[in-house]
Amino acid sequence: MRKLIILLIFISVSCSTVREQIMPFRNYGYSGERLFPIQNSDADNIVRIWINNGTSIDRIITVSKGKNFSEHSELIEIGLTKNGKRKFLTQEEQKPLSGIAKFLQTVDSLNLFQYESQEKFSPALHQPFSFYVIEQKKDGKYHQFTFNTDFPNKNEEATKFTALEEFIMNEFKWEFKLN
């Protein structure tokens, strides 16, 4: 009986302990699948979109394509739930609705390297609004800009930023964890 108790304690402790795994080849190339700066990515074309829609959860979308790496696309959600008492993290592969190649083609046609950060934004008092950071690295050139929208409220004037937000929302679907 004593051996059984010791065995059960050993199994329960060993199964619940978080352990890092040794991965000797993980750092040979970086194509955007981790949250390292995209300036250091080996991908030929990489776009990272940081989103907060006025909730306690931030969303990070990364889409990349490179010579030495297959296409990659993922959604990371990180933040707090249950009134800020529970940490929340998910990381899942999520391809754009139109596919990675078509998504990057559309991004290129938008010419994001010409976008400048939004200078003026006046959110409605006591209403949530969204904040975006868009990063792109292509052919060794890097660009970043930020903007805000009134999302989730739908009564704002159409701009190039609201059009970009709509493009992102149509390509990627995620579940809002509001209830």
Image (cartoon, rainbow, N blue to C red):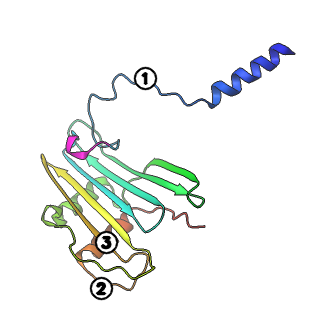
Q: Which mark is residue 22?
A: 1
Compared across the picture, whether 142 is left or right of 173 comes to left
Q: Is residue 66 above or below residue 63?
A: above
Q: Which mark is residue 142?
A: none
- Quarter of the rendering containing residue 26: top left
Towards the viewer: 4 or 45: 4
The stretch of residues the image draws in magenta is 36-40
Left or right placement of residue 142 versus residue 179 in this view? left
Q: Residue at x 34, y 44 (%)?
A: 35
58 on left or right of 110: right
State the CA–CA distance, disc 3 to disc 1: 40 Å
Local secondary structure at mark 3: strand
Q: What's the CA distance linking mark 3 and mark 2?
A: 12 Å
Please state which amino acid type lies under the numbered disc 3.
Answer: Asn
Mark sitting earlier along the chain (3/2): 3
**Type of amino acid under label 2:** Glu
Q: Residue at x 16, y 67 (%)?
A: 116
Q: Position of residue 157 (x, y in %)?
A: 30, 85
- From the viewer's side, name the closer residue of 38 and 111: 38
Query: Disc number at residue 157?
Result: 2
